Image: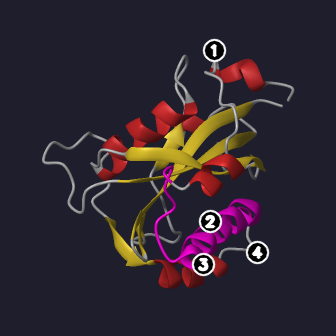
Amino acid sequence: MKVRPRAETFIFKENRVLANLTGDHVVFPGGGIDVNESPKDAAKRECREEAARRLINVTVAHAPTMQFWPKSYAKRKGAKWADGYEGGLTYWFTGSTSDAPLSEKHRDYEPGFAWHHSKAVIERLKKDAGGDWGDDVKVRIKVLETHLAAGQAISPTKKSIRTLFSLPYPTLQTAGSLRDA
């Protein structure tokens, strides 16, 4: 099976999370991992490109997960990045950033990214939990609920969180290196 490695990031400010709620689904900064790029570096790059934010204090939020895409997903219009892949391997991160976007915007910038209360985002995600992306949605909900339960942003300065989620992330040599995984 050919999978697309990707990184997704949850960025917290107190009880708020940076997300794009303008479409049919909740979107967090994230996307494909380039050849010879670490998942952590991809998370930083995607955050800069999509949300125009410089990501700092990056740490693992959850163990990587595999998703299997519906057959029609990679064939839809505008999804050239998904062409030829049957699923994705997602590396989940959390971090912090500035309140406002950077002045310089990348061509992939999505202006819909804004700060939303985590509880409201969880409620919106619960509507998607039974769909094609149910497993990934459950991870998103788990990370947001963990953040709320902690009462503060998950931070790499918290030894217990750092120890709990310290997983190795090798640099991917080729996007197809996970084939037959």
Q: Nearer the viewer, mark 4 or mark 1?
A: 1
Among the 4 quarters of the image, the one containing residue 6: top right
**In the rendered structure, which segment of residues is drawn in magenta?**
132-157
CA separation, marks 4 and 3? 24 Å
Q: Which residue is mark 4?
A: 130
- Mark 1 packing: few (<14 Cα in 10 Å), some, or many (20+)? few
Question: Can you see residue 125?
Answer: yes
Residue beneath disc 1: 173
What is the CA distance from the residue labelled 3 to the residue labelled 2? 10 Å
Location of mark 2 (residue): 143
Q: Nearer the viewer, mark 4 or mark 3?
A: 3
Residue 61 percent coordinates (x, y): 61, 53
Q: Is residue 76 among the parts visible in the rendering?
A: no
Label 3: element kind: helix
Please provide percent x and percent y for residue 68: 78, 48
For mark 2, give the secondary structure.
helix
Q: First in sequence: mark 2 or mark 4?
A: 4
Q: Which residue is identified by label 3? A: 149
